[in-house]
Image: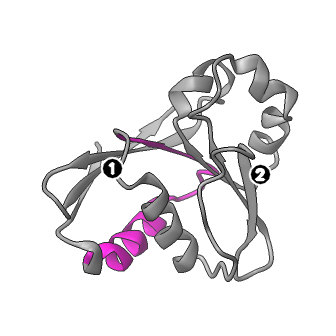
Amino acid sequence: MPLSIDISSLAALPAAAAQLRAALGSHTLILFEGEMGAGKTTLIKALCENLGVQDDVSSPTFSLVNEYRNGQNQPIYHFDFYRIDDPADALRMGALEYFDSGYLCLIEWPSRVEALLPLHRLLVTIMVTGPDSRQLIITEVE
Protein backbone atom coordinates (compact mmCIF):
# COMPACT_ATOMS: atom_id res chain seq x y z
CA MET A 1 0.00 0.00 0.00
CA PRO A 2 1.43 3.41 -0.96
CA LEU A 3 2.60 5.78 1.76
CA SER A 4 1.46 9.39 1.60
CA ILE A 5 3.41 12.31 3.09
CA ASP A 6 1.95 15.81 3.12
CA ILE A 7 4.34 18.75 2.98
CA SER A 8 2.53 21.93 4.01
CA SER A 9 5.46 24.29 3.40
CA LEU A 10 9.21 24.43 2.84
CA ALA A 11 9.62 24.49 6.63
CA ALA A 12 8.04 21.00 6.74
CA LEU A 13 10.52 19.60 4.20
CA PRO A 14 13.14 18.29 6.68
CA ALA A 15 10.49 16.25 8.53
CA ALA A 16 9.17 14.89 5.21
CA ALA A 17 12.74 13.96 4.18
CA ALA A 18 13.14 12.04 7.45
CA GLN A 19 9.89 10.16 6.74
CA LEU A 20 11.08 9.40 3.20
CA ARG A 21 14.43 8.15 4.54
CA ALA A 22 12.58 5.83 6.93
CA ALA A 23 10.54 4.51 3.98
CA LEU A 24 13.62 3.63 1.88
CA GLY A 25 14.05 0.23 3.50
CA SER A 26 16.47 -1.85 1.43
CA HIS A 27 15.75 0.04 -1.79
CA THR A 28 18.74 1.60 -3.52
CA LEU A 29 16.86 2.89 -6.59
CA ILE A 30 14.60 5.81 -5.73
CA LEU A 31 12.65 7.34 -8.61
CA PHE A 32 11.28 10.89 -8.39
CA GLU A 33 8.39 11.78 -10.68
CA GLY A 34 6.56 15.09 -10.79
CA GLU A 35 5.84 17.94 -13.10
CA MET A 36 8.51 20.53 -13.91
CA GLY A 37 8.95 22.72 -10.84
CA ALA A 38 7.26 20.26 -8.45
CA GLY A 39 10.37 20.17 -6.25
CA LYS A 40 12.17 16.94 -7.16
CA THR A 41 15.64 18.44 -6.70
CA THR A 42 14.58 20.30 -3.55
CA LEU A 43 13.28 17.07 -2.03
CA ILE A 44 16.46 15.20 -3.01
CA LYS A 45 18.54 17.96 -1.41
CA ALA A 46 16.57 17.60 1.84
CA LEU A 47 16.90 13.80 1.73
CA CYS A 48 20.65 14.05 1.15
CA GLU A 49 21.01 16.45 4.09
CA ASN A 50 19.11 13.90 6.22
CA LEU A 51 21.58 11.23 5.06
CA GLY A 52 24.54 13.34 6.17
CA VAL A 53 25.67 14.68 2.79
CA GLN A 54 27.89 17.74 3.28
CA ASP A 55 28.33 18.46 -0.44
CA ASP A 56 26.31 21.03 -2.35
CA VAL A 57 23.36 19.09 -3.81
CA SER A 58 22.17 20.43 -7.15
CA SER A 59 20.47 19.13 -10.26
CA PRO A 60 22.80 17.23 -12.61
CA THR A 61 20.78 18.43 -15.62
CA PHE A 62 23.79 18.76 -17.90
CA SER A 63 26.22 16.27 -16.35
CA LEU A 64 23.39 13.65 -15.98
CA VAL A 65 24.85 12.37 -12.69
CA ASN A 66 26.31 13.94 -9.54
CA GLU A 67 28.04 11.96 -6.83
CA TYR A 68 27.79 12.88 -3.17
CA ARG A 69 29.03 11.17 0.01
CA ASN A 70 26.70 10.36 2.88
CA GLY A 71 27.60 10.49 6.59
CA GLN A 72 29.28 7.05 6.31
CA ASN A 73 31.33 8.24 3.30
CA GLN A 74 29.38 5.99 0.92
CA PRO A 75 28.45 7.32 -2.52
CA ILE A 76 25.00 8.56 -3.40
CA TYR A 77 24.31 9.01 -7.11
CA HIS A 78 21.87 11.71 -8.24
CA PHE A 79 20.60 11.46 -11.83
CA ASP A 80 18.56 13.88 -13.91
CA PHE A 81 17.44 12.26 -17.16
CA TYR A 82 15.30 15.19 -18.35
CA ARG A 83 17.60 15.82 -21.34
CA ILE A 84 17.86 12.14 -22.33
CA ASP A 85 16.00 11.47 -25.58
CA ASP A 86 17.15 7.88 -25.99
CA PRO A 87 17.91 5.36 -23.22
CA ALA A 88 21.03 4.43 -25.22
CA ASP A 89 22.52 7.75 -24.06
CA ALA A 90 22.11 6.59 -20.44
CA LEU A 91 23.71 3.25 -21.33
CA ARG A 92 26.72 5.03 -22.81
CA MET A 93 27.25 7.02 -19.62
CA GLY A 94 27.26 3.79 -17.59
CA ALA A 95 23.83 4.06 -15.94
CA LEU A 96 23.48 0.30 -15.48
CA GLU A 97 26.73 0.11 -13.53
CA TYR A 98 25.45 2.82 -11.20
CA PHE A 99 22.05 1.11 -10.82
CA ASP A 100 23.75 -2.22 -10.00
CA SER A 101 26.33 -0.70 -7.63
CA GLY A 102 24.28 -1.32 -4.48
CA TYR A 103 24.60 2.35 -3.58
CA LEU A 104 21.71 4.79 -3.35
CA CYS A 105 20.61 6.10 -6.76
CA LEU A 106 18.23 9.06 -6.75
CA ILE A 107 16.69 9.44 -10.21
CA GLU A 108 14.79 12.44 -11.58
CA TRP A 109 12.74 11.89 -14.76
CA PRO A 110 13.04 8.07 -14.60
CA SER A 111 10.38 7.56 -17.28
CA ARG A 112 13.01 8.61 -19.85
CA VAL A 113 15.05 5.48 -19.03
CA GLU A 114 12.22 3.15 -17.91
CA ALA A 115 13.49 0.24 -20.01
CA LEU A 116 16.84 0.27 -18.15
CA LEU A 117 15.48 0.30 -14.60
CA PRO A 118 15.63 -2.83 -12.44
CA LEU A 119 12.31 -3.99 -11.00
CA HIS A 120 13.05 -3.54 -7.28
CA ARG A 121 12.69 0.22 -6.74
CA LEU A 122 10.80 2.90 -4.88
CA LEU A 123 8.72 5.47 -6.75
CA VAL A 124 8.20 8.89 -5.16
CA THR A 125 5.51 10.87 -6.96
CA ILE A 126 5.44 14.55 -6.06
CA MET A 127 2.08 16.25 -6.50
CA VAL A 128 1.71 20.03 -6.29
CA THR A 129 -1.19 20.78 -3.93
CA GLY A 130 -0.63 24.53 -3.48
CA PRO A 131 1.94 27.31 -3.98
CA ASP A 132 4.25 25.87 -1.27
CA SER A 133 2.58 22.55 -0.46
CA ARG A 134 3.19 19.12 -1.90
CA GLN A 135 2.02 15.56 -1.41
CA LEU A 136 4.43 12.64 -1.78
CA ILE A 137 3.09 9.25 -2.77
CA ILE A 138 5.68 6.53 -2.14
CA THR A 139 5.11 3.22 -3.90
CA GLU A 140 7.22 0.05 -4.01
CA VAL A 141 7.73 -1.34 -7.50
CA GLU A 142 8.66 -5.01 -7.63
- The residue located at (86%, 35%) in the rendering is 94
For the residues marked 2 and 1, what is the alpha-carbon distance in whole angstroms? 28 Å
What is the magenta range?
A: 12-34
Residue positioned most to the front: 62
Residue 17 sits inside the magenta stretch: yes
Mark nearer the N terminus (2 vs 1): 1
Which residue is the site of mark 2?
Answer: 102
- The residue located at (33%, 70%) in the rendering is 16
Front residue of this view, candidates 139 and 45: 45
**Amino acid of disc 2:** Gly
Which residue is the site of mark 1?
Answer: 38
- Secondary structure of the residue carrying numbered label 2: loop
- From this view, report whether residue 93 is shown above or below residue 51: above
Residue 38 in percent (x, y) is at 33, 49
- The residue located at (65%, 27%) in the rendering is 84
Left/right of residue 61 with respect to residue 97 in the rendered view? left
Image quadrant in which you'd find residue 121: top right
Within 10 Å of disc 2 (Cα), the crowding (few <14, some 14-19, many 20+) is: some
- The residue located at (61%, 31%) in the rendering is 83
- Secondary structure of the residue carrying numbered label 1: loop
Left/right of residue 130 with respect to residue 80 in the rendered view? left
Image quadrant in which you'd find residue 8: bottom left
Are the residues flagged by discs 2 and 1 in contact, CB closer than 8 Å? no
- From this view, report whether residue 52 is shown above or below residue 27: below
Residue 142 in percent (x, y) is at 52, 31
- From this view, report whether residue 21 is shown above or below residue 91: below
**Amino acid of disc 1:** Ala
Within 10 Å of disc 1 (Cα), the crowding (few <14, some 14-19, many 20+) is: many
